[in-house]
Image (tube, rainbow, N blue to C red):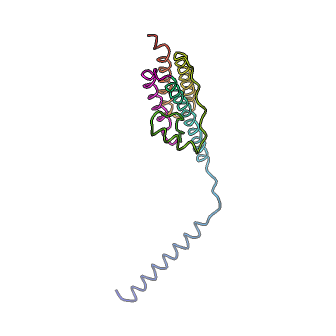
Amino acid sequence: MTTTGRRALLTAGVSAAAAAALTGCTASEDPGPRKPSAAEVEAERVARAEAALRLRSVTASRTLLERYDAALAAHPALAPRLTPLRRSVAAHAKALGEGGTTVRPATAAPSPSATATASASASVRPTAPPVPVAADPRTALKELAAAERTAADAHTAALVTAPPEYARLLASVAAAGAAHAYLLTEGARA
């Protein structure tokens, strides 16, 4: 290739690049803030509603978990009966919170590492008042069963607005709560 051929090729390439740059500049002028589409607005509304639903569900389960912790602290003799149910409630709270919901830690955590975490976060947020527990163990079990029913009712009510996969989880947690309430009251008589 001769020098003239190379120059012609180089000039043609530079001209093509300049034309593309000019076209790109005029096409990408900022017309101002873009208004979100109706679909984007609806998606944002649905995402906010689901986040609020998840937060309410997790809060109901965490409140129930705090009641278990308070009952166990007040009546250590009930530990063989309450510990498996408490473990189940803790697993439910974790499962309900998966998917991006920020969950506050339970105020009365049974493990040392959880206690250290709660102590470290106590300076950041105020601590919740202690959960009252009846002095009589039978009454404490009845109150815990009532709290289980309340949480199960809240999860059942949330089914109406929950997305399908989360609704299945809520239904399962509500059913487990009903079973726990039975085990805390009627199941003890059998």
Q: Residue pushed farthest top?
A: 190
- SS majority, magenta: helix
x then y, percent, for residue 116 = 48, 41
Q: Quadrant of the N terminus?
A: bottom left
x then y, percent, for residue 185 = 50, 15
x then y, percent, for residue 28 = 58, 66
For the residue pair 34 and 71, the one nearer the viewer reads as 71
Q: Quadrant of the C terminus?
A: top left
- Magenta segment boundaries in residue numbering: 75-101
Query: Residue 5 lies in magenta, yes or no?
Result: no
For the residue pair 11 and 164, the one nearer the viewer reads as 164
Query: Residue 89 lies in magenta, yes or no?
Result: yes
For the residue pair 164 and 64, the one nearer the viewer reads as 64
Q: Residue pushed farthest left?
A: 1
Residue at screen point 40% across, 89% down: 4
x then y, percent, for residue 109 = 49, 34
Q: How many marks?
A: 0
Residue at screen point 48% across, 29% down: 89
Residue 113: quadrant of the picture? top left
Q: Residue pushed farthest bottom?
A: 3
Residue at screen point 58% across, 40% down: 46
- On screen, 126 above or below 12? above
